[in-house]
Amino acid sequence: MAIPDQADAAERAPSPAVDRALTVLERLVAADEELTLTALAKATRIPLATCASIAYTLERRGYATRRVVGRSHFWRPTLRLYGLASQLVRKVDLSSVAQPEMRALADELSMPVHIGVLDGASVVYVAKAATAGFIQFDTYPGKVSPFNLTALGRAIAAYLPEEELEALLPRLVVGRGPGAGDSGPEAFRKLLKEVRSRGYAVEDEEEQAEVACVAAPFFDAEGLVAGSVGVTGFARDLRGRRRKQAAAGVLRVAAEVSRRLGCPPAALPQTKAVS
């Protein structure tokens, strides 16, 4: 984890004291081993006396602990932070985490916008921003679809750890739409490579005729893929310029969801700009 120059950070921070405390805590978490106060002060560029005061305060509040060896004190973080994070994760409601942005995108494209999460080998739709009009797509919170036949599922699968993806490959489903192609593991891996290259996934009349979808993944506080944001429309309306517009939109909303889930910007995959 990169530690900013303390002089610059303190100058910019509304509260230099809080900024320094968080810098110490972040360094303790990022360290691969216990740190002495001298090493901690040097790594954070914080004066030794100030660094010691912060470390003892963190210890008193339960966020750090130390091991004493002779005259040396070796510091490390505790799991108190994990407890806080767990509470926050339980309170995060993906069905409402980005509703204003989903609604704005649905209005912009005149197409419904969804959030999906992976459940086994299926994608579950957990949120929807619908559009007004007579025609309504059969996509609703609670709907379940094969992960490999939806852009939502492909966007997630492209960023899964290898062992998790490997477990899903025997469960690939053959599409019934006119655009369905090779459903084998090798072809699917090639498709996921394309998803990672452009940053978003596309499904075009593969699950069913006349329907297409574009989706982008979002990530949690640990930088792990947590779900995806997608747009569904008639295939004829999700081609060319309109597809690029939809792709830019889902990438924008997905980035906002990632931010709200606490994903560090540096952990987001680097993608090409949609042009």
Image: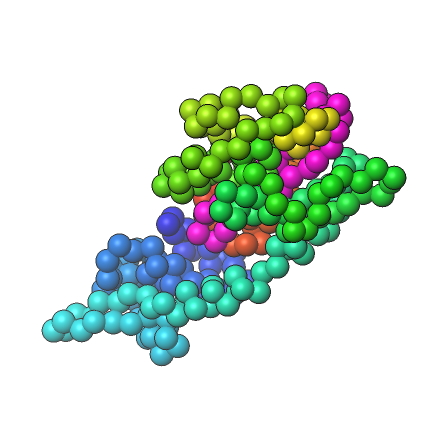
Q: Is 214 in front, or is 22? A: 214
- Depicted 73 relative to depicted 234: above or below: below
**Marker count (numbered):** 0
- The residue shown at (24%, 62%) is 35
- The residue shown at (42%, 35%) is 170
> Looking at the image, which residue sits at the far right?
134
Give the quadrant of residue 110: top right
> Looking at the image, which residue sits at the far bottom?
60
> Looking at the image, which residue sits at the far left?
70
Q: Is 149 in front, or is 196? A: 149
Identify the image quadrant of the C terminus.
top right
Q: Position of residue 92 (x, y in %)?
A: 58, 60
Q: Position of residue 195 (x, y in %)?
A: 52, 29
- The residue shown at (43%, 28%) is 185
- The residue shown at (57%, 65%) is 91
Magenta-drawn stretch contains 236: yes
Q: Is residue 189 left or right of residue 250?
A: left
Magenta residues span 214-242
Q: Is 219 in front, or is 132? A: 132
Q: Is residue 117 visible?
A: yes
- Depicted 242 relative to depicted 266: above or below: above
Q: Position of residue 150 (x, y in %)?
A: 60, 35
Magenta-drawn stretch contains 41: no
Q: Is residue 113 left or right of residue 38?
A: right
Q: Is residue 204 visible?
A: no
Q: Is 7 in front, or is 144? A: 144
Q: What colour scheme has been applied to the protein in the rendered image?
A: rainbow
